Amino acid sequence: MDFSKVPKLVEAELDFQYVRGSGPGGQATNKTSNCVVLKHIPTGIVVKCHDTRSALQNKELAKIKLIDKLDLLYNGEDAIENQKKKFLLKKTLEKKRRQRKRAEEKAEAKRIATLMTQSSESDSKVE
């Protein structure tokens, strides 16, 4: 995979906001402002992260998510996510090809074994 085209984040182009979380967790979730909303000012892409209880961890995770989105926007087919998908697809197709080949070889061996037993049975009947 080619990581050379992955965009780098410049702190001056980012706008961080800490907002109250949502979802399950009750009062603890509703009271703490550990949900991070990260905006990339030049593109206007907004990422929201509330995966952990820590605001610092959420900030780092939001940066990673933003890098992934920017990579997809700028690089398209050459984005890391698409490279992974292509690699996995190629791997699964290769695996299926090997399975098919193995099954054909087994079927051929079985067919030959059947022919051999039939010919040996016919030879024993002649005598």
Image (spheres, grey):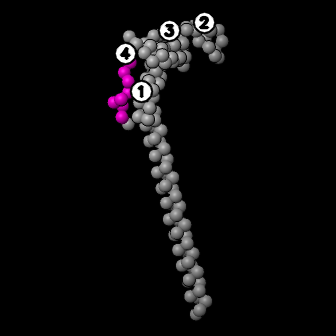
Q: Residue at 56% across / 78% down in the picture?
A: 115
Q: Residues within 10 Å of mark 4 (few under 14, many from 20)?
A: few
Query: Which callout, 2 or 3, points to the residue nearer the camera?
Result: 3
Q: Is residue 53 above or below residue 110?
A: above
Tell me the kind of residue under disc 1: Tyr
Bounds of the magenta segment? 2-10
Depth check, mark 2 against mark 4: the one in front is 4
Q: Which mark is residue 17?
A: 3
Q: Residue 74 placed where, x, y %?
A: 42, 27
- Earlier along the polypeptide chain: callout 1 or callout 3? 3
Spatial CA span between label 1 and label 2: 37 Å
Q: Is residue 61 magenta?
A: no
Residue at the outermost bottom position: 127
Which amino acid does the dot numbered 3 rest on? Gln
- Frontmost of labels 1 and 3 is 1
Which quarter of the figure is the N terminus placed in?
A: top left
C-alpha gap between disc 2 and disc 3:
16 Å
Where residue 112 appears, as percent x and y from the top left, is: 53, 74
Mark 4, secondary structure of its residue: loop
Q: Nearer the viewer, residue 93 or 107?
A: 93
Real-space Cα separation, disc 3 to disc 4, in angstroms: 16 Å
Determine which residue is flagged by label 2. Answer: 31
How many angstroms separate mark 1 from mark 4 (CA)?
15 Å
Instruction: Indicate the secondary structure of the residue bearing disc 2.
Output: helix
Q: Which mark is residue 10?
A: 4
Classify 10 Å Cα crowding around label 2: few (below 14), some (14-19), many (20 and above). few
Provide the residue designation for mark 1.
74
